[in-house]
Image (cartoon, rainbow, N blue to C red):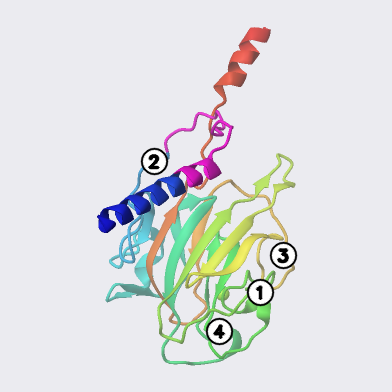
Amino acid sequence: MFALEKKSFWMLLGAIIVMASGAAVWKPFDEYKSGIVWPEPPIINPGNELHAPSDAIVLFNGKDLSAFENGEKWLIEDGYAQVQGSGITTKQPFGSCQLHVEFATPEEVKGDGQGRGNSGIYLMGKYEVQILDSYKNKTYFDGQCGAVYKQQPPTVNACRKPGEWQSYDIIFEAPEFNKDGTLKTAAFVTVLQNGVLLHNHLELQGGTFWDQPPHYESHAAKLPLHIQDHGNPTRFRNIWIRENINPLVGTLPEKKEEAKGSL
Ligand code: MG
């Protein structure tokens, strides 16, 4: 008998709590909806450490560099490609993009400063995100690994040891130019090294040059991607690029109706 009363007590208490909590979250407003009719985001396979996302263009999958001019010059071994004799340039041009690159500076340390594990990712062949062995290797800060060369040092030095595999994930917004060649919209870049943010939507001051201050020179909306040969046997693997990084565009049907009615 006592057990039954105890059970009833807890059931009653439970009901009171549920009712009270319901009252606490109840609001006299309708759910907000933007009214925008969005296209459905495409369904993709995001891939994993070994496989690119299904909507990416694979530039190097460990087997050949046929996506690049001069790719045949590089040493390809055990799933990686090693700088040899020339820089390589994609046959296909790209504009705004998301780029994934894995690289390893030479395990055997030779040279110092800019002469150690130097290579680089040249977005549109013009805007270099530096690759360098910056593990206990000082150089000018806007030239160390992860720098936008001679424009902006990385926010942190996130380098792994020589010979260890590292990654760059780069989101690049291509610049736009007016018909008269003047700059309409600057380029922007976001860079993560080994998953760590180095640059957050950084506005580029122009092309990256060794012997000139940065400046823009009008160019096409899409240009090939270049990977630098700086005389050091830096290795690469798992390179892929995604072109469509623009936000989805929705429509506002209500506003269209209003426009029709006013005619
Ligand atoms: Mg370089």
Looking at the rendered structure, the kind of residue marked 4 is: Ser
Looking at the rendered structure, the kind of residue marked 3 is: Pro
Local SS, label 1: loop
Q: CA distance from mark 1 to mark 4?
A: 12 Å
Q: Quick check: 93 above or below 51?
A: above
Q: For the residue with label 3, is its CB less than 8 Å from the closest atom of ligand 1? A: no
Circle 2 is placed at which residue position? 42
Residue 80 is left or right of residue 94, and the answer is left
Where residue 229 appears, as percent x and y from the top left, is: 49, 74
Magenta residues span: 19-40
Q: Dot 1, crowdedness within 10 Å: few (<14), some or many (≥20)?
A: many
**Which of the numbered marks, if any, corresponds to residue 153?**
1
Residue at image position (30%, 68%) is 62
Quadrant placement of the C terminus? top right
Q: CA distance from mark 2 to mark 1?
A: 36 Å
Sequence order check, earlier mark of 3 and 2: 2
Q: Quick check: 252 above or below 195?
A: above
Where residue 211 appears, as percent x and y from the top left, is: 70, 73
Residue at image position (69%, 59%) is 206
Looking at the rendered structure, the kind of residue marked 1 is: Pro
- Tell whether label 1 touches label 3 (CB within 8 Å): no
Dominant secondary structure, magenta: loop
Circle 3 is placed at which residue position? 214
Circle 4 is placed at which residue position? 134
Disc 2 versus disc 1: nearer the observer: 2
Q: For the residue with label 4, is its CB less than 8 Å from the closest atom of ligand 1? A: no
Quadrant placement of the N terminus? bottom left
Disc 3 versus disc 1: nearer the observer: 1
Residue at image position (70%, 39%) is 179
